[in-house]
Amino acid sequence: MKFGVIVFPGSNCDLDAYHLVRDVLKQPVEYIYYNETSLGQCDVIILPGGFTYGDYLRSGAIARFSPVMPAVADFADRGGAVLGICNGFQVLTEAGLLPGALYRNDNLQFRCEQVFVRVDNNSLPFTRSASLGKVLEMPIAHGDGNYYAPPALLREMEAGGQVVFRYTDHNGDVTSAANPNGSVDNIAGVCNKNGNVVGLMPHPERAGEKILGSRHGLIIFKSIVSYFLDREVF
Amino acid sequence: MLKQAVLDPQGAAVENSLKALGYDRVSGVRVGKYIELNLEADSREEAALKVEEMSRRLLSNPVIEDFSYTLQEAGV
């Protein structure tokens, strides 16, 4: 299996994602530039964090029209595994590949800190190695992470298991104090209806080594690796 | 503009600041974006159609924002 990390103008977590896949997971990985029109032979596509196009207009709004995005949309439509982290999550919502929208944190602060998120759907290729309700410690670093979806859409997402991660305290309890940005229902990450496209505001790629304070983010990457290993075997 | 149903943190901060300045009868402050552009079109209808299309596709995010626009003929 092979990972591809999309590099947009203004991406700045592309190196972190590449490093984690190559040096920690020990899996093949390549960069795919925003102006390419093919994803090559990649099995997993990562849209990394950063500030694409300076976050002008809205976070992710301009990147989503990059030449590479039709290939990402096509890949996602065919069931390909796509992970959007932070700004990558914003790009995916702007592109309509994930439901809802992300806008200014309710406290107007840029929040850069460790948070706890709970896994509320562990049946996805990206979460299958986690137990349901597992609490993961990962860093966040964003100013536009306030997740919103209108009430009817939220109900539909909830029923379909599309709410994947929620901000909680270290015990896994959803509290307003644990919500760093005002996200509706403490939502930190969601997936599309088929579960092959996942986006989250926390940074699992920055929580994959002991020296970084937490290795909990690895479970997301190990999940997708195990998913492909199982597919090869069976 | 953010839809009425969507909380506007910037608007709330501006409102608090106005109140601190003594404008205590202010309420409902909302902060939006104002975008100006030139567009060549053969008719007003065509211009309206294009502006609406641009607004839906890029200038606004229909999940959280509404938009309105005015057209002004710039002359040849």
Image: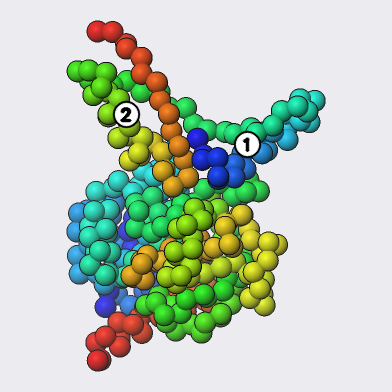
Residue A194: percent from the left, percent from the top? 33, 70
Q: Is residue B24 left or right of residue A80?
A: right
Q: Chain of mark 2?
A: B
Q: In this view, which residue lies farthest toward the top?
A: B76
Q: Which residue is mark 1?
A: B11
Label 2: how many residues lie within 10 Å, few (<14), some (14-19) or many (20+)? Answer: some
Work out whether residue B13 can be spotted: yes
Instruction: Choose top left, top right, bottom left or bottom right for residue A192.
Output: bottom left
The x and y percentages for residue B69 are 40, 25
Residue B66 sits in quarter: top left
Which type of secondary structure does the marked residue at label 2 adopt?
helix
Front residue of A223 and B46? B46
Residue B14, x across and y down, in percent:
67, 33
Q: Is residue A9 above or below residue A231?
A: above
| Res. A54 visible in picture | no
**In the shown orientation, is residue A171 left or right of residue A11?**
right
> In which chain is the residue bearing label 1?
B
Q: Which residue is mark 2?
A: B51
Label 1 neighbour load within 10 Å: few <14, some 14-19, many 20+: some
What's the residue at 52%, 75% (across, down)?
Answer: A119
Q: Are marks 1 and 2 on the same chain?
A: yes
Towards the viewer: B22 or A18: B22
Q: Amino acid at mark 1?
A: Gly
Q: Earlier in the sequence, mark 1 or mark 2?
A: 1
The vertical placement of B7 against B40, above or below, is: below
- For the point 78% across and 28% down, the residue is B24
Q: Number of callouts in the render?
A: 2
Question: What is the C-alpha distance between the residues marked 1 and 2?
Answer: 26 Å
Identity of the residue furthest to the bottom in this view: A234
Measuring from the top left, give residue A60's x and y in whole percent. Answer: 41, 48
